[in-house]
Every structure is written in C-alpha cells, then in structure tokens.
Image (cartoon, rainbow, N blue to C red):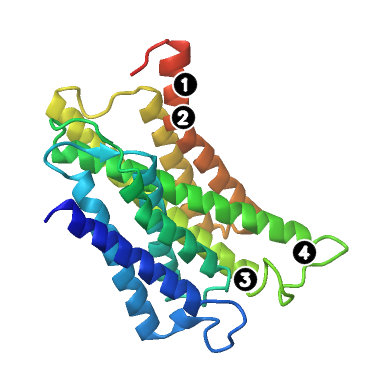
Amino acid sequence: MDASFYGAVSLAAAAGYLGLAWAHRRGSAAAAMPLTSRFGQGLLLAVIALHGFSLLPNWFAQEGLHFGFATSISWTLWLAVLLLWIESWFQRLPPITQGVFIVAAIAAALPMIFPGRPLGATLDVTFRLHMLLAMLAYSTFTLAAASALLMLSMEKALHQTRRLNIDATGWWQGLPPLIGLDQMLVHMVFAGFTLITLTLMSGMAVGAELGRGLLRFDHKTVFTLASWALSLTLLLGHKWWGWRGRVAARWTLAGFVTLLMAYVGTRFVLEVVLDRAV
C-alpha cells in the first residue's frame, strides 16, 4: 500500500471527525449527546480506527521511523478522542466535545502536509514501540492535566460569590458535575499510569537488547519513575482514602510536571547544561 492510500485514509478520518462535529453541534436537542447510542459509539470507533491506521505506516516504515510535530499532534488527538469514546460509555459527553472533533480532523490530515523526516532505518521495532508508548503516556498526562485545571477552575468558580451557572449558554454548557469530571480524571490517570508502566517495560527491553542493563538511572528514567510513583499514589489514594477534587487535581498536575521534566528537562540538561546537541 502506497502513501496515496494512507493519505486517503487520513482524509476519510478527517471527514468522519467533521461529520461527528456536525452531529454534535450545539443547539440540537436530539444531537446534543449523539454518542449515547450504540450506533454513534460504533461510528466514532470506526473513525478512530481509520485515524490510527493512517498513522501506523509512517511509524513502522522500513525506510525509517518518520517523526515530526505533526505526527506527535495527530497521535495526541487520536488518543484524546479514544479516551472520549471510552468516557462515552460511562457518561454523556458535553457539547464542547464538538471542538475536540474539529481539532482531531485537522490533526488527522496534518501529517500529509508535514510528514516529518525519517530518524533512521536501523531502529528496531522494540525501540519504535518504546517511543510510541512514551509519547502516548505524555499525551495522556497532558489531557489529564487539562482536566485537572478544568476541575480546579470549576471548583473555584462555584465557591465564588458569583456562582457558575452550568446550564447557561457558553463554554461551560452541558459539562458534567464535578464528580463526573473527577471520574474522567481518574480514568485518564489510570490510562497514563498503564502507558508509563508499558513505557518502562519496553525501555527495559531496549536496554537489554543494547547491553545497557534493564534501567539507566539518568534524568529521563528518574523523572519517569517519579511520575509513575505519583500516579500510583493517586490511584491508591482515590481507591482507599477517597482522594477527589483539589487533592486529585494537584496530584495529577504534579505527575504531569514530573513527566514533563523527563523529556523537556532531559533536553535542557543535554543541550544547555552539558552542551550536547543529541
């Protein structure tokens, strides 16, 4: 299958997202929550599958691993919509989901314009899978951090004199209650924890193949382990001690910042502190 075929798949995924955004448009009572039906959920899953299928060839191409900002954005939005699909089985999605579908449509087509560049044909499948898992873990915690900030903003607004009217027309219209947002946050943190665990396991496999040992305790590994521990603590605290609201949001943000340091902080140390452009 050539690039034109996968380009057509990307366009089909983008068209599917736009169709879902139209069906999810604000102002239609019947279409306010289209994903409550099995047909709507099945349609979204089909679009998600198309989107993911269009991304896999560039990632596992024999001529080299293709990677760029467009690919990273596309994977991030793919994961975001997948998490929304999972959440649609637990609670109704608000009308602002329309915006996510529109952004996902743009992200699905973006790698066609900016395909990135091959990083090397010698990278084996295990290393490519390790990079993909790490990127998805980072993307998941980005979404979890955004949910945590949304929870903190809503809670602060609800405690102010001028109360937030959830039913009023605007950005907040149709959002689930705080307990619903809390459930979404925990689901995202659990997904991120799972991806970090898989990232660490695949990293151990890569290290063993390269003869470097299971773990190299460099900046990236230390911060990734710290984020893994913070995520596990939050999940256990939520289950055993009922951590919710501000507590859960702050632990989530701590885990996100720690994971961010694993990548951004590592680049800073290599390029600025050690003066190595690696």
Q: Residues within 10 Å of mark 4 (few under 14, many from 20)?
A: some
- Distance between the alpha carbons at the discs numbered 3 and 4: 13 Å
Would you say 196 lies left or right of 250 here?
left
**Residue at the right extreme?**
161
Q: What residue type is labelled 4?
A: Leu
Q: Residues within 10 Å of mark 3 (few under 14, many from 20)?
A: some
- Distance between the alpha carbons at the discs numbered 1 and 4: 39 Å
Of the pair 137 and 251, the residue shown nearer to us = 137
Query: Tag 2, which secondary structure?
Result: helix
Residue bearing the label numbered 3? 175
| Mark 3 or mark 1, earlier in chain | 3
Of the pair 259 and 168, the residue shown nearer to us = 168
Residue bearing the label numbered 4? 158
Q: Which amino acid does label 1 sit on?
A: Phe
Residue 87's disc number: none
Q: Residue at x 46, y 29 (%)?
A: 264
Q: From where the camera sits, is residue 137 visible?
A: yes
- Quarter the N terminus occupies: bottom left
Instruction: Please say if the residues under marks 2 and 1 sit with CB atoms less than 8 Å apart.
Output: yes
Of the pair 112 and 259, the residue shown nearer to us = 112
- Distance between the alpha carbons at the discs numbered 2 and 3: 32 Å
- Distance between the alpha carbons at the discs numbered 2 and 4: 35 Å
Of the pair 222 and 67, the residue shown nearer to us = 67
Residue 264's disc number: 2
Q: What residue type is labelled 3?
A: Leu
Would you say 127 lies left or right of 100 here?
left
| Mark 2 or mark 3, earlier in chain | 3
Would you say 194 lies left or right of 161 here?
left
Residue 60 position within the rendered picture, expressed as x and y whole percent measured from the top left: 17, 45
Instruction: Please say if the residues under marks 3 and 1 sit with CB atoms less than 8 Å apart.
Output: no
Residue bearing the label numbered 1? 268
